[in-house]
Structure formats: structure tokens, C-alpha cells
Image (tube, rainbow, N blue to C red):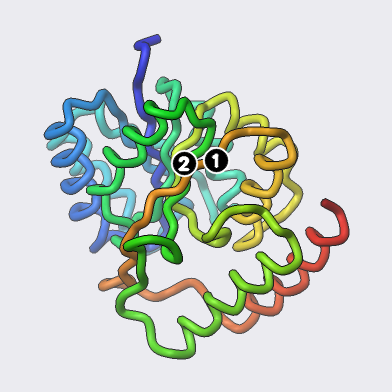
Amino acid sequence: MPENKYSILLPTYNEKDNLPIIIWLIVKYMQESKIDYEVIVIDDGSPDGTLEVAKQLQKIYGEDRILLRPRASKLGLGTAYIHGIEHASGNYIIIMDADLSHHPKFIPQFIDLQKSNNLDVVSGTRYSGAGGVYGWDFKRKLISRGANFLSQLLLRPNASDLTGSFRLYKKEVLKELISRCKSKGYVFQMEMIVRARQLGYTVGEVPISFVDRVYGQSKLGGSEIVQFAKNLLILFATT
């Protein structure tokens, strides 16, 4: 195995418009920084043709850079990561959203911080330093801030952004954390950081700009918010 190779996991569901742009940006910034990488696209049976678009991108950039590991149906983020790790040849894993809310320009900063401090986890934060959120209406910002505030109050994780999903992990650390996590949905990301602190793993943060999706529909609805609150209380009771 190469000493430092980065496997970027991209879970997708109905992202045919965003996928070409996010892949192009990843390739651009990884090549500019001379970083060894692969992108693993984990499509959960998107009906909009996301997988067909991914196949075209694989022809453009090469099968050594773009790996397609689709699944038959929508099975959730946690299992998507497990599925991706099984096929990852890198010793570091980067997880990010495919909807352009996470800009690949921050990846070299994640890697630099990890290297300089030998960190187990590096997490992007919207709520510290130069970090911020762009394109959300007041209601969406309020929900996100409120969720983060409640999480900080109940869990005291010593991290400024618990609900974000743009992170870099040492592969073995990510495997260990996933094996211990019980949450599903949006609380899953939060539990990962809480468990990391409990197990004594080192966690660093890089301020990021989070931009709301340009194409497609947000997957956050009323039922997700109710589920989040319920799972947060369960996490509080069990950690």
C-alpha cells in the first residue's frame, strides 16, 4: 500500500447534475497538490441516471481514479461508508457530500493539518474561524444552529461543528468508529465525533464554507428533524 493515499467516498442519490462538477473539482485540487487519491462513488440506485453519468466520468478520468461501487437501493450513510471502506485502497478516508456543498479546495488543508499534528480525524467546521454557511434561508440556519447548540449542550464533545459531514479519517480509526456507532441519519455524524473523543482519538478542525446545493432537492425534511431530536436524546442517554 502507498504510504499516503486518500480514498474519497462519495455517497450519491439523484446527483447526476452535481457529480460531473464535484469530480472535476476533486481531480483539479488533488492534481494541483500532487496528492495520490481515488474517488469511490457509492450510488444507492438513483432513478435519475446518476450511475450512468458516473460511468462516463470513469471513462474520462480513468478506472484507477474513479471507482464505481453502486448498491441496489437507498440503504443509508453509515452502510455506504462501510461499503466504500471495503473497496478503498487508501490508508486515509475522506468523506464528503456530492451536492457541491463541500468544496474540494479544502481537502489539501485537511491533509496538511492531519500531517502536521498526526491527527486521527480532521473535521470541517462551519462554526469556527472563517467558516460559514451560504445559501440557506433563516429557517434552515436556525435548525442547523439549534441542532448544533443542543448537541454541544448535551454531549460536550469539544468540537465546534458536530453535524457536518466533510471529514478526513485514518482508515483504521474510521472502521473502529463505525463499528461502535449505533445512530442512523444525521445523528450518525455527531456520534462519530463523540465516540472519537471517548476513545481518545485526536480530532482537529478546518474552517470551511458550506454552500447550499445548486441542483436537486435537499434531503432534510420535517421527519428528519423529529428523528434527529429523538436520536440526540438517545445518544445523550447512552454516551
Residue corresponding to mark 2 = 122
Q: Foreground residue, 3 or 44?
A: 3
Which residue is drawn at the image coordinates 58% and 24% (left, top)? Answer: 172
Counting other residues with Cα less than 10 Å from the Cα at mark 1, is it few (<14), some (14-19), or many (20 or more)? many
Rendered view: 117 above or below 139: above
Residue at the (53%, 75%) spot, across then down: 144
What's the residue type where badge 1 is placed? Val
- The residue that mark 1 highlights is 203
Q: Can you give x and y, in whole percent of width and height, for residue 72 in the image?
A: 52, 48
- Type of amino acid at the residue the image marks with label 2: Val
* Residue 113, quarter of the rendered image: top left
Q: Residues within 10 Å of mark 2 (few under 14, many from 20)?
A: many
**Among all residues in the image, which is located at the extreme bottom?**
138
Which element is circle 2 on? strand
Expressed as whole percent of the image width and height from the top left, the position of residue 141 reads 46, 81
Left or right, residue 103 beside residue 117: left
Q: Secondary structure at mark 1?
A: strand
Which residue corresponds to the image point at 50% horizontal and 31% vertical from the top-left?
119
Residue 98 sits in quarter: bottom left
Q: Are marks 2 and 1 in contact (CB under 8 Å)?
A: yes
Q: Quadrant of the N terminus?
A: top left
- Mark closer to the chain start, 2 or 1: 2
8 horizontally vs 53: left or right: right
Query: Is residue 80 among the parts visible in the rendering?
Result: yes
**Residue 163 in picture, x, y percent from top left:** 55, 62
**Cα distance between the residues tagged 2 and 1:** 6 Å
> Would you place residue 16 above or below residue 2 in this image?
below
Q: Is residue 70 visible?
A: no
Residue shown at 52%/84% (left/top)?
A: 142
Depicted 46 relative to depicted 1: above or below? below
Q: Position of residue 22 (x, y in %)?
A: 24, 52
